[in-house]
């Protein structure tokens, strides 16, 4: 009787089964990611409605900036994970490379940054600039909005090219050449614009301040992105380029406050009683302050005997007026009283004269 040996048979699972299982798992991941994205979309909508009921606008800006990019980010992340699990046909393996997904996330990051910056500046910057009288503030806000809208995206574009291993040297070179050409063509415009920006930041003067820039003296009536305008005391408007303003010495008569020291020089004849002259001048300042409210007694008026001149004694009266625009009124009031009181007191004001002596031969 023969005995036959029967070998054990091990069952085998076709590779197609694993491929099918992996692909089903990938599909499940995509479905789950899509469901999470939809859920997140409704959650963000609810948060936006809640933020709309608060007094602060910052939460609205943050949620608006993060909302849609977050929904897309969750969906993209689920697709990336699904591709790592799935078995792709030959020739499509490149889809699994992370650089493409990194590029998408850079786009989403730029979206968030640009949206947040633009809305933040529009919400807080524009109203603040509108409350000022300087047009340069509006120009700075417009420049900031351009940066938020275009520069951030341009930087993101360069980063994406770098991630995708695309040589960005030609782009940088082209941008540099274009920038240089624009800068040369608009050199004066750019210089004045940034000069206006420096004026806005440094604030050496404000609208209606009385200033002196070189030989120009008057009240500031306009500060723009290109120039500053001064209305002179002769009712003329002088337009000064901003680049010249920031490179010049500026005297601001309205800072630190509107008070201004007024100096009135006097020439008194030799032989006059110095003490009497000073007493009369002090009486004049007190009378002027009593009859003209814009002339101040605090700080107290001062009278100085400064020097012996060639043909006179040099005095100076120093008083304060409460408004830099009343300098001439102050001088007029003081000089009028000086003329009257000196005539009454017999104090002589000398005038240039020449004695001619004829010698007989």
Image: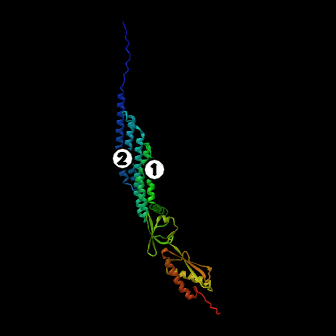
Query: Where residue 301 sits in the image (x, y, percent)?
Result: 56, 77
Q: Is residue 76 left or right of residue 196?
A: left
Residue 87: mark in rendering: none
Pointer 2 local density, CA inside 10 Å: few below 14, some 14–19, many at least 20: few
Query: Where residue 338 sits in the image (x, y, percent)?
Result: 54, 84
Q: Is residue 139 above or below residue 336?
A: above
Q: Is residue 161 above or below residue 346?
A: above
Farthest bottom residue in view: 360
Q: Nearer the viewer, residue 3 or 209?
A: 209
Numbered-mark total: 2
Q: According to the image, what is the colour scheme of the structure?
A: rainbow
Pointer 1 local density, CA inside 10 Å: few below 14, some 14–19, many at least 20: few
Q: Nearer the viewer, residue 105 or 64?
A: 105
Residue 280: image quadrant is: bottom right
Q: Which residue is mark 2?
A: 43
**Visible in this render: residue 128?**
no
Q: Nearer the viewer, residue 135 or 5?
A: 135
Q: Residue drawn at (44%, 51%), measured in percent from left and top?
A: 175
Q: Is residue 337 above or below residue 82?
A: below
Alpha carbon separation for disc pair 1 and 2? 45 Å
Query: Where residue 292 sits in the image (x, y, percent)?
Result: 49, 80
Quarter of the image for the N terminus: give it: top left
Farthest front residue in view: 361
**Visible in this render: residue 338?**
yes
Residue 91: image quadrant is: top left
Query: Where residue 247 sits in the image (x, y, percent)?
Result: 51, 65
Q: Residue drawn at (43%, 57%), measured in percent from left and top?
A: 182
Q: Is residue 353 left or right of residue 181?
A: right
Q: Which residue is mark 1?
A: 173
Q: Secondary structure at mark 1?
A: helix
């Amino acid at each position: 009787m023969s005995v036959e040996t029967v070998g054990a048979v091990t069952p085998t699972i076709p590779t197609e089964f694993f491929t099918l299982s992996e692909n089903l798992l990938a599909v499940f991941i995509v479905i789950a990611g899509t469901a999470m994205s939809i859920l997140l979309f409704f959650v963000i909508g609810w948060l936006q409605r809640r933020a709309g009921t608060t007094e602060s606008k910052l939460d609205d800006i943050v949620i608006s900036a993060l909302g849609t990019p977050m929904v897309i980010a969750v969906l993209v992340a689920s697709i990336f994970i699904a591709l790592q699990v799935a078995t792709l046909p030959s020739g499509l393996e490149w889809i699994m490379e992370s650089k493409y997904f990194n590029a998408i996330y850079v786009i989403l990051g730029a979206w968030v940054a640009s949206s947040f910056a633009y809305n933040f500046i529009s919400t807080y910057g524009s109203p603040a600039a509108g409350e000022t009288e300087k047009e340069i503030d509006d120009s700075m806000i417009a420049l900031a909005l351009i940066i938020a809208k275009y520069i951030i995206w341009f930087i993101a574009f360069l980063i994406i090219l770098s991630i995708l291993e695309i040589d960005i040297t030609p782009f940088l070179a082209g941008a540099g050449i274009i920038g240089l050409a624009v800068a040369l063509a608009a050199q004066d415009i750019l210089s004045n614009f940034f000069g206006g920006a420096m004026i806005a930041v440094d604030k050496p003067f404000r609208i209606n301040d009385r200033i002196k820039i070189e030989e120009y003296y008057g009240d500031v009536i306009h500060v723009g992105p290109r120039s500053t305008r001064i209305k002179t005391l002769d009712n003329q408007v002088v337009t000064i380029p901003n680049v010249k303003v920031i490179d010049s010495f500026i005297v601001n008569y309205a800072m630190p406050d509107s008070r201004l020291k007024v100096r009135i020089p006097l020439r008194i004849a030799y032989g006059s009683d110095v003490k009497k002259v000073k007493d009369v001048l002090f009486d004049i300042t007190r009378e002027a302050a009593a009859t003209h409210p814009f002339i101040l007694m605090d700080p107290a008026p001062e009278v100085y005997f400064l020097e012996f001149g060639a043909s006179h004694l040099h005095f100076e009266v120093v008083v304060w007026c409460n408004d830099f625009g009343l300098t001439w009124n102050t001088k007029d009031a003081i000089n009028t009283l000086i003329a009257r009181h000196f005539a009454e007191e017999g104090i002589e004001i000398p005038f240039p004269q020449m004695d001619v002596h004829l010698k007989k031969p």
